[in-house]
Image (cartoon, helix red, strand yellow):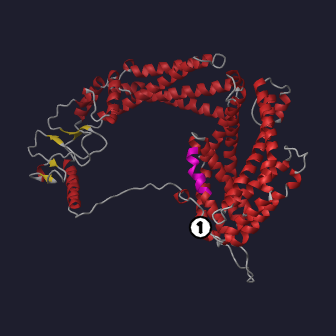
């Protein structure tokens, strides 16, 4: 059966299979959208979507295979095997899901279906490769082309498919490559071959070109400057073929007779260019391409370079540029997810950008910066939802370090719930970071930061009255105001009946963080005492932060024991669940967190005393006085 007859016979089946596959896939997607498919969906919904999508992909690939084959179906062993394996995998899935969806049936389905799809894809690749190969030869008469076309099915059959595929792969991964004989066999005595073999002992300045041409008696030799003359030939018009230089593909290259003079001219031009370059006395030409990273002007910043004479608005711009660069620098690591500290650093950078806008809001044009601030807050929130779960899991790992295996197993319900929630939040984070709106925000915010004219601040009112706006004039007032706010909590702290669950502890943590961040923002122009101040404030902030985290964790753990899932309870859960679940190991972990909270409360007076101590106030004033010496 010729290829044309085969195509006509099975074209209807190929078209129907392809269209049916598209319909199945579209139906699966629409059904998933309408039914709001999620991990908590019913088994019927999950099975229907998976079966329709799997069958659709199978039908699409089958249709493409049939449309591209040039031999009978009985000889298409890879196609039949791929079809059989894929159908087997789908049938096992339908029969076993969900009641018997257990190991090793899951592995059978994955292996059978994946291997079947893989074989179908290989078959498509090889079929169309052979079609391209058979259609890339020299043009001939209609009778000759018809004869060649009739001969292809007998030589290009499915039994040589694996050899063909192996030859194609070997072409790209080895210095010399293998091709089946039916691909390289030729009776054309005019064909010229060039062998380009790279030797590990030879560097780029040593190249060998070997020409075998039965019709030409004028050899061509290309040599390096160090080995001899650049070009040696008798007559340019007698050159039929010239081997082009290659640095990627090696092996036997067939060059057709047409276009030989054009290649020769190109090589001649290259050789003449080499000659002119070598004639330059004592000069070296070096062309280097340095890739420019996105937002490189921000990534390269190591400090803010704030000056005491800058306006507060200009200082805010420099601080935002530094931390925007930190956020962008850690974005890729956050997406990859290998190191959770990448996410932590990116989140902290977003938090500090939000803080500087809030702290210096009186000196900024809030109308212009409002849309950027909104996106910064959203970024911090998305990153924080994943970071909080990372912290919960780290605390659990620390708790289980010295526990027996049965305790680790007993914590599985809690850790599984946390991992599921983290996977959900991380998925939302990746969608957000890859979203067009987020990338638009980065570009617009970068342009806004680089436009200095948008950050200019008037130093004089319309009536000529000066406006205090310089860092040297306004920063001391700002720092003393923030420090006074922190010291005002002394009355609440001295109360022995102070409950760590009260909101005042949380608010104190926020005010301490604002004071610490402000000192860090301007530490380049403050006195050296600022380092010790930042260290003491960080210890107080960490104590209050751990205390707040423990309070929140206890609330979430109680909800987990009641409703069996991580997160805040809603009305539906409250209505459907009234009994506490029995998690003995989780109960022990709750007691551990309660003891941790009590230890933090007990340690709080020590870290608080370092900040409220008069010596701290003296060092605080000395640090501020450094601004007048910078």
- Residue 62 seen by the camera: no
Residue 432 percent across, percent down from the top left: 63, 46
Q: Quadrant of residue 400?
A: top right
**Magenta highlight on residue 343:** no
Name the residue rendered at 81%, 52% in the picture: 507
> Circle 1 sits in a helix, a strand or a loop, which is it?
loop
Query: In the figure, is residue 364 to the left or right of 251?
Result: right
Residue 251 percent across, percent down from the top left: 25, 37
Query: In the figure, is residue 325 to the left or right of 180?
Result: right
Question: In the figure, 91 relative to 198: above or below?
Answer: above
**Mark 1 = which residue?**
451
Q: Residues within 10 Å of mark 1 (few under 14, many from 20)?
A: few
Residue 164 percent across, percent down from the top left: 32, 28
Viewer-proximal residue, 606 or 310?
606
Magenta residues span 323-333
Name the residue rendered at 35%, 28% in the picture: 165
- Residue 291 seen by the camera: yes
Quarter of the rendering occupied by the C terminus: bottom right
Viewer-proximal residue, 181 or 335?
335
Question: In the figure, 245 relative to 411: above or below?
Answer: below
Q: Quadrant of residue 10?
A: top left
Quarter of the rendering occupied by the N terminus: top left
Name the residue rendered at 30%, 40% in the picture: 249
Query: In the figure, is residue 134 to the left or right of 491?
Result: left
Question: In the figure, 89 relative to 467: above or below?
Answer: above
Disc tally is: 1
Viewer-proximal residue, 25 or 96?
96
**Magenta highlight on residue 324:** yes
Residue 325 percent across, percent down from the top left: 58, 56
């Amino acid at each position: 059966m010729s290829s044309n007859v085969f195509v006509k016979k099975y074209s209807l089946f190929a078209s129907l299979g392809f269209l049916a596959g598209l319909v199945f896939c579209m139906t699966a997607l629409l059904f998933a959208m309408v039914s709001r498919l999620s991990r908590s969906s019913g088994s019927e919904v999950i099975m229907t979507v998976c079966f329709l999508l799997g069958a659709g992909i199978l039908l699409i690939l089958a249709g493409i295979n049939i449309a591209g084959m040039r031999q009978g179906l009985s000889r298409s062993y890879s196609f039949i095997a791929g079809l059989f394996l894929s159908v087997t995998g789908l049938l096992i899935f339908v029969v076993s899901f969900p009641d018997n969806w257990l190991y090793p049936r899951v592995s059978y389905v994955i292996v059978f279906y994946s291997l079947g799809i893989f074989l179908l894809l290989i078959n498509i690749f090889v079929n169309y490769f052979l079609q391209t190969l058979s259609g890339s030869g020299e043009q001939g008469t209609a009778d000759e082309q018809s004869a060649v076309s009739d001969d292809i099915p007998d030589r290009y059959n499915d039994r040589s498919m694996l050899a063909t595929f192996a030859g194609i792969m070997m072409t790209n991964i080895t210095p010399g490559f293998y091709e089946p004989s039916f691909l390289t066999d030729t009776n054309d005595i005019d064909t010229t071959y060039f062998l380009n073999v790279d030797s590990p002992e030879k560097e780029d300045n040593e190249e060998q070109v070997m020409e075998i041409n039965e019709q030409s008696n004028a050899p061509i030799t290309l040599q390096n400057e160090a080995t001899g003359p650049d070009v040696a030939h008798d007559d340019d018009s007698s050159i039929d073929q010239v081997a082009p230089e290659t640095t990627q593909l090696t092996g036997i290259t067939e060059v057709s007779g047409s276009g030989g003079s054009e290649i020769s001219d190109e090589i001649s031009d290259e050789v003449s260019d080499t000659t002119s370059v070598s004639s330059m006395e004592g000069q070296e030409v070096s062309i280097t391409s340095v890739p420019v990273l996105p937002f490189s002007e921000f990534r390269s910043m190591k400090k803010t370079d704030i000056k005491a004479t800058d306006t507060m608005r200009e200082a805010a711009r420099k601080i935002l540029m530094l931390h925007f660069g930190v956020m962008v620098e850690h974005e890729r690591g956050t997406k990859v997810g290998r190191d959770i500290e990448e996410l932590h650093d990116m989140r902290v950078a977003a938090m500090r950008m939000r803080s500087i806008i809030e702290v210096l809001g009186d000196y900024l044009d809030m109308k212009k910066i409002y849309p950027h601030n909104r996106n910064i807050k959203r970024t911090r929130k998305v990153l924080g939802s994943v970071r909080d779960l990372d912290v919960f899991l780290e605390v659990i790992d620390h708790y289980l370090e010295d526990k027996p295996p049965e305790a680790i197993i007993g914590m599985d319900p809690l850790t599984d719930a946390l991992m599921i929630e983290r996977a959900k939040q991380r998925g939302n984070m990746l969608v957000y970071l890859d979203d067009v709106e987020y990338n638009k925000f980065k570009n617009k915010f970068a342009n806004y930061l680089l436009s200095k004219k948008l950050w200019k601040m008037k130093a004089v009112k319309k009536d000529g009255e000066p406006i205090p706006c310089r860092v040297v004039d306004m920063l001391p007032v700002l720092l003393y105001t923030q420090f006074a706010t922190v010291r005002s909590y002394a009355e609440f702290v001295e109360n022995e009946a102070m409950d760590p669950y009260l909101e005042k502890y949380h608010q104190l943590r926020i005010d301490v963080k604002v004071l610490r961040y402000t000192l860090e923002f301007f530490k380049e122009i403050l006195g050296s005492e600022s380092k010790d101040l930042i260290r003491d404030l960080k210890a107080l902030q960490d104590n209050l932060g751990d205390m707040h985290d423990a309070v929140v964790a206890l609330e979430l753990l109680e909800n987990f024991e009641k409703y069996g899932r991580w997160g805040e309870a809603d009305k539906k859960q409250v209505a459907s669940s009234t009994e506490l679940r029995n998690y003995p190991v989780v109960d022990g972990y709750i007691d551990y967190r309660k003891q941790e909270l009590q230890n933090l409360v007990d340690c709080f007076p020590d870290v608080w005393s370092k900040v409220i101590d008069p010596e701290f106030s003296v060092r605080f004033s000395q640090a501020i006085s450094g601004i007048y010496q910078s």
